[in-house]
Image (spheres, rainbow, N blue to C red):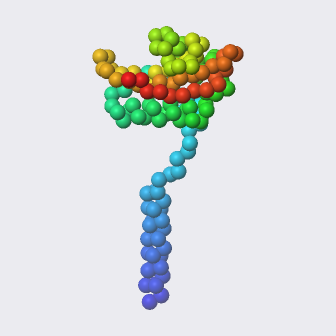
Amino acid sequence: MKFAILFSSLVLTALTACSRSAEMAERPRPLTSPSSEDLLEQLRQKLRVTITSNGQDREHSRLAERVVNERLLVGLRKEEIERKLGPGVACGSPWPCIEGMQSEDWYYEVGRLPQGTLGGTPVLLIDFDQSGTCIASRVVHTQ
């Protein structure tokens, strides 16, 4: 009798432990937020990607908007931005940007469309002051 009680107690303990470890394995691990550098590296990679779907276009837009909303470029000088994202294109060459942007301001197309495709891409606009420091950025979508 004592053996049966001891045995069933051991089985119950083992089953409880297995159940808990299975629950732990099924729980998603908490996601850590990417660092500023990680987000800028992700953006740099997206600049060269060919956009082939609406979902991919939205993903590119969300990433660029996150960089803008978190103000990751504000306060950086042109040289720093170029080091992080690659060379920007001056507004007015070949695209005029938007009203209020000057020729010293830059833009980045966040992705490319396949050759011969009509449509637009997200565009990251960077507004610089006279000293070459980013004072604002925004995202527009070209058509």
* Nearer to me, 92 or 18: 92
Q: Is residue 105 above or below residue 36?
A: above
Q: In which quarter of the image is the C terminus?
A: top left
Specify the farthest residue to the left: 116
Instruction: Say which residue appears at 67% left-offset and 26% top-offset.
Output: 75
Quarter holding the N terminus is: bottom left
Q: Where is residue 140 in the image (x, y as percent from the top left)?
A: 47, 27
Q: Which of 32 and 131 is in front in this view?
A: 131
Residue 86 in view: no
Q: Can residue 35 be seen in this view?
A: yes
Q: Where is residue 83 in the image (x, y as percent from the top left)?
A: 59, 19
Q: Position of residue 84 (x, y in %)?
A: 58, 23
Q: In this view, does 109 lie above or below 34?
A: above
Q: In which quarter of the image is residue 118?
A: top left
Is 31 displayed left or right of 76 in the figure?
left
Residue occupying the point 36% across, 35% down: 55
Q: Quadrant of residue 117?
A: top left
